[in-house]
């Protein structure tokens, strides 16, 4: 146990990331420039063949409690040394609460495609892609919160009528912690009723989605990313062993706080996440109007903007194939390594959950090019990883000049822990790849934002990132020219398959 005087001198900060698969908690010592403890607890996913993907918000609270206590124990500190908490959350999820603060329906998640028809109708009512861009600075996508609210109105009218507030997952955890209903621009960007250029709710757009609901009443109050959401409620503070007046930072979406956790807070870098989904983002000082509607002009959770693309099938796809063969991660990596580049002609379009980029919400997975010779475990394992990575390159290309000028890709997420996958990303993109020492970067980003909020005026976010975002030099992967050339041919094959199967231009 740390000496009490030293604890009081060193201010501890907690970062929480409520993701699709689990809640992660890290305890950070800013002065010591180190992460003292971390822990996680899993979530259960409610799935349906119609694209339903939901979770019970109560599971997030249970996971928070368990992971928090374990992380503090692992850190070896007295929890009263904690000064502030930051929360990252999976984006786009709909948490609709009644007047008592209880969910009226399970939270519909970012990967839910049950609302695709509702999204198409909303886009049309808003004037198509041009109308969406004019009103929101981006084009509504299936998975954004807007279509979930419209779906609830049409399919669950009794639950819809009970709505008293509409929150995102990280907003809900902030509400549980503080009792305050607030939101910040980064996560709000993915709702579909927020103007990403002016950083304001669009009440007129919300009225198209939910005409019976009063936006002023049900939407959370907007705060700046450097402002606190509030302080931890006294009863909960006692339960968690916290001192009085522990700040809760504004928090943000997992992509925004993942960017902070990789030090991607200025132009010149790309953050690429190999998580359940895949995301690619690059910082911009100005709002971006991209050529493709699939590029989301999201705000950053530290000021500025974070143009981003999201694919829906990365480790979710590779895990399906791995578990199909009953392989653990080590054996799966061996199979990938034992297959040649291009998997002897096997191509997978890994759209097990539909897809957002390209926009194919109703798509299913396709296994192409199989013969009696190349249908092996090794080839299928390698093909699903290659194809998931090709999807990321497809998205990277959509970012245009923001990505072309990047000197380095900061790789995070579960897939980033695989050396063979890191090299594959470098070779497929033709760009140097390196991981932060903490590849679950959203939780670290949340802790850094919490420290920034607590120490506002005394230090900058840039200084905090410099002190805490450490790169793992052992993870460095440089593109090898021969493999870059080989992958260009295989990527062309993937694009041709995409064009033939889904009429996406090659």
Image: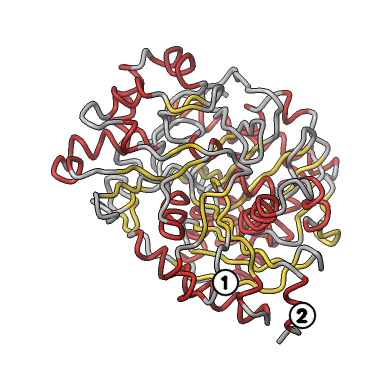
Question: What x and y, as percent, mark residue 212?
Answer: 20, 29
CA neighbours of label 2 inside 10 A, class few (<14), some (14 to 19), many (20+):
few
Helix, strand or loop at mark 2: helix
In the image, 36 versus 342, the foreground residue is: 36
For marks 2 and 1, the one nearer the N-term is 2
Left or right of 304, for residue 91: left
Question: What x and y, as percent, mark residue 124?
Answer: 32, 17
On residue 243, which mark appears?
1
- Residue at image coords 68%, 82%: 76
Helix, strand or loop at mark 1: loop
- Residue at image coords 53%, 26%: 196
Q: Quadrant of the N terminus?
A: bottom right
Task: Kindly tell me whether residue 420 is visible in this rendering.
Answer: yes
CA neighbours of label 1 inside 10 A, class few (<14), some (14 to 19), many (20+):
some
Q: In which quarter of the image is the C terminus?
A: top right
Q: Distance between the residues labelled 2 and 1?
A: 15 Å
**Colour scheme in use:** secondary structure
Report which residue position mark 2 lands on.
5
Verify CB contact (< 8 Å) between mark 2 and mark 1. no
């Amino acid at each position: 146990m740390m000496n009490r005087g030293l604890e009081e001198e060193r201010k501890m900060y907690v970062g929480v990331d409520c993701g699709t698969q689990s809640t992660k908690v890290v305890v950070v010592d800013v002065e010591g420039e180190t992460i003292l403890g971390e822990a996680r607890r899993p979530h259960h996913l409610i799935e349906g063949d119609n694209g339903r993907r939901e979770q019970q918000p109560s599971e997030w609270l249970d996971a928070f409690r368990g992971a928090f206590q374990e992380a503090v124990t692992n850190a070896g500190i007295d929890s009263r040394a904690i000064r502030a908490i930051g929360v990252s959350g999976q984006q786009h999820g709909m948490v609709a609460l009644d007047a008592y603060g209880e969910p009226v329906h399970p939270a519909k998640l970012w990967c839910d495609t049950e609302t695709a028809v509702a999204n198409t109708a909303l886009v049309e009512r808003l004037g198509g892609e041009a109308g969406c861009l004019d009103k929101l600075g981006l084009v509504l996508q299936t998975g954004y919160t807007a279509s979930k609210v419209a779906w609830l109105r049409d399919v669950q009218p009794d639950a819809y009528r009970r709505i008293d507030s509409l929150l995102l997952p990280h907003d809900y955890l902030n509400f549980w912690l503080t009792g305050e209903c607030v939101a910040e621009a980064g996560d709000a960007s993915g709702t579909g009723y927020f103007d990403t250029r002016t950083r304001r709710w669009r009440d007129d757009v919300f009225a198209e989605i939910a005409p019976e609901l009063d936006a002023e009443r049900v939407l959370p109050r907007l705060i700046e990313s450097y402002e606190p959401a509030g302080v931890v409620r006294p009863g909960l503070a006692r339960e968690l062993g916290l001192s009085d007046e522990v700040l809760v930072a504004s928090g943000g979406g997992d992509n925004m706080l993942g960017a902070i956790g990789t030090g991607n807070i200025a132009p010149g870098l790309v953050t690429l996440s190999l998580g359940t989904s895949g995301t690619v983002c690059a910082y911009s000082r100005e709002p971006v109007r991209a050529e493709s509607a699939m590029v989301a002009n999201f705000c950053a959770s530290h000021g500025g903007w974070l143009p981003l693309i999201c694919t829906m099938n990365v480790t979710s796809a590779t895990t399906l194939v791995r578990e199909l063969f009953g392989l653990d991660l080590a054996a799966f990596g061996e199979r990938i390594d034992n297959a040649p580049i291009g998997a002897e002609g096997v191509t997978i379009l890994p759209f097990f959950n539909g897809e957002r980029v390209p926009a194919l919400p109703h798509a299913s997975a396709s296994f192409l090019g199989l013969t009696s010779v190349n249908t092996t475990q090794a080839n299928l394992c390698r093909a699903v990883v290659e194809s998931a990575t090709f999807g990321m390159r497809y998205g990277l290309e959509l970012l245009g000049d923001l990505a072309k000028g990047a000197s380095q890709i900061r790789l995070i997420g579960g897939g980033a822990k695989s050396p063979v996958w890191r090299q594959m990303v470098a070779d497929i993109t033709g760009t140097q790849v390196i991981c932060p020492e903490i590849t679950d970067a959203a939780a670290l980003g949340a802790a850094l934002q919490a420290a920034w909020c607590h120490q506002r005026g005394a230090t900058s976010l840039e200084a905090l990132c410099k002190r805490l975002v450490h790169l793992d030099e052992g993870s460095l992967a440089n593109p090898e020219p021969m493999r870059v050339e080989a992958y260009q041919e295989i990527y062309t094959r993937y694009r041709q398959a995409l064009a033939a199967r889904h009429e996406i231009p090659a």
